[in-house]
Image (tube, rainbow, N blue to C red):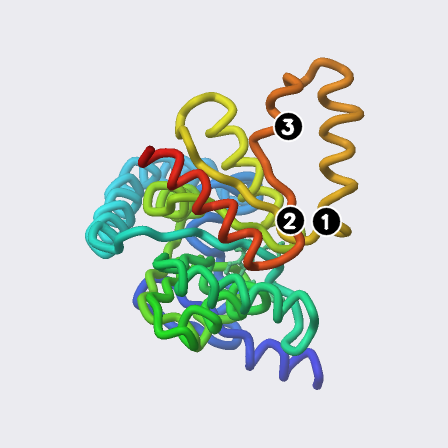
């Protein structure tokens, strides 16, 4: 019974479609593109050929995500992307930290971009909205979709993670990262790699919460740098602070350096 309720409540947004119940068990577009062992291996050979052919047509859908993203965000003005856990609970210290980051960014003249989901993303969007600033959510279609949080003012739903990731970097002057899990680390390390390789320059990456991020930074220094996997100066690509005010000041310092 509980499982039936869970199936009935499950909601999947797939492009213009909203799917509930059994229909929401269908794979997402990202799964169909990437998880080919799951979706194609069981199919008879003829269908596998058909599936391979449809990959070419997916290019048009992918292209439309870039067109939509570029079109919506081109005139956003200065913005900062904020990342953090989808699981951060309302009322927790980490929720309030993300909310303060959203608020402080708006006060400093930045729009706030998040993944549009729950937890720390909603908190940052909430802070931005409460400070009467621009609050952007770049949502992603997931197997257990939760929908865009209520604090998003400008929302775009993506089907493909990689198209969405381009928007986080292209339209932001920097990243502020509050405590999070796999998704947050993925976004953090993608940005670090882009800066390390010179693909983007003068792009501040600020980790908020010394107690949370300290062990990761220790590992970067004591293991990666110590074993020559990164250069010692790569450690300077990331700043670690404790408060929302310090995080925004770190972003501004880079922006002011750029103007000087
Ligand atoms: C897991 C839950 C909801 C998932 N909904 C998400 N919506 C939008 N963006 C998401 C979602 N989950 C992860 N992300 C992206 O990754 C980062 C957070 O991942 P983490 O593993 O929680 O750190 C975040 O910045 C998003 O861009 C409800 O429990």
Mark-to-mark CA distance, 3 and 2: 14 Å
Helix, strand, or loop for circle 2? strand
Residue 137, percent from left and from top: 40, 62
Query: Does 153 sit above or below residue 44?
Result: below
* Residue shown at the point (59%, 36%) measured from the top left: 238
Outermost residue toward the front?
260
Discs 3, 2 touching: Cβ within 8 Å:
no
Dot 2 surroundings within 10 Å: few (below 14), some, or many (20 or more)?
A: some
Residue 193, percent from left and from top: 52, 29
- For disc 2, the marked residue is 241
Dot 3 surroundings within 10 Å: few (below 14), some, or many (20 or more)?
A: some
Mark 2 or 1, nearer chain start: 1
Q: Nearer the viewer, residue 206 or 184?
A: 206
Mark 3 or 2, nearer chain start: 3
Please indicate whether residue 39 sits to the left or right of residue 52 in the image.
right
* Residue shown at the point (59%, 76%) measured from the top left: 7
- For disc 3, the marked residue is 235
Helix, strand, or loop for circle 3? helix
Mark-to-mark CA distance, 3 and 1: 15 Å
Q: Which mark is residue 210?
A: 1
């Amino acid at each position: 019974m509980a499982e039936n309720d869970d199936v009935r409540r499950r909601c999947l947004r797939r492009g213009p479609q909203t799917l509930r119940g059994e229909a929401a068990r269908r794979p997402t577009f990202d799964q169909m593109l990437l998880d080919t062992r799951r979706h194609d291996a069981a199919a008879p050979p003829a269908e596998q050929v058909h599936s391979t052919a449809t990959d070419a047509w997916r290019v048009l859908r992918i292209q439309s995500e870039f067109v939509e993203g570029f079109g919506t965000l081109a005139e956003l003005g200065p913005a900062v992307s904020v990342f953090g856990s989808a699981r951060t609970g309302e009322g927790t210290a980490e929720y309030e930290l993300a909310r303060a980051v959203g608020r402080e960014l708006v006060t400093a003249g930045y729009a706030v971009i998040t993944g549009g989901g729950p937890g720390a993303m909603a908190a940052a969007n909430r802070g931005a909205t409460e400070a009467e600033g621009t609050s952007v959510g770049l949502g992603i279609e997931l197997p257990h979709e939760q929908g865009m949080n209520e604090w998003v003012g400008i929302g775009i739903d993506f089907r493909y993670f990689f198209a969405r990731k381009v928007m986080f970097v292209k339209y932001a002057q920097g990243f502020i990262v509050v405590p999070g899990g796999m998704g947050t680390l993925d976004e953090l390390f993608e940005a670090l790699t882009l800066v390390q390789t010179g693909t983007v320059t003068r792009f501040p990456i600020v980790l908020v919460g010394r107690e949370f991020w300290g062990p990761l930074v220790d590992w970067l220094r004591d293991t990666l740098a110590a074993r020559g996997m990164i250069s010692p100066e790569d450690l300077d690509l990331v700043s670690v602070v404790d408060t929302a005010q310090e995080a925004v000041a770190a972003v501004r310092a880079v922006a002011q350096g750029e103007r000087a």
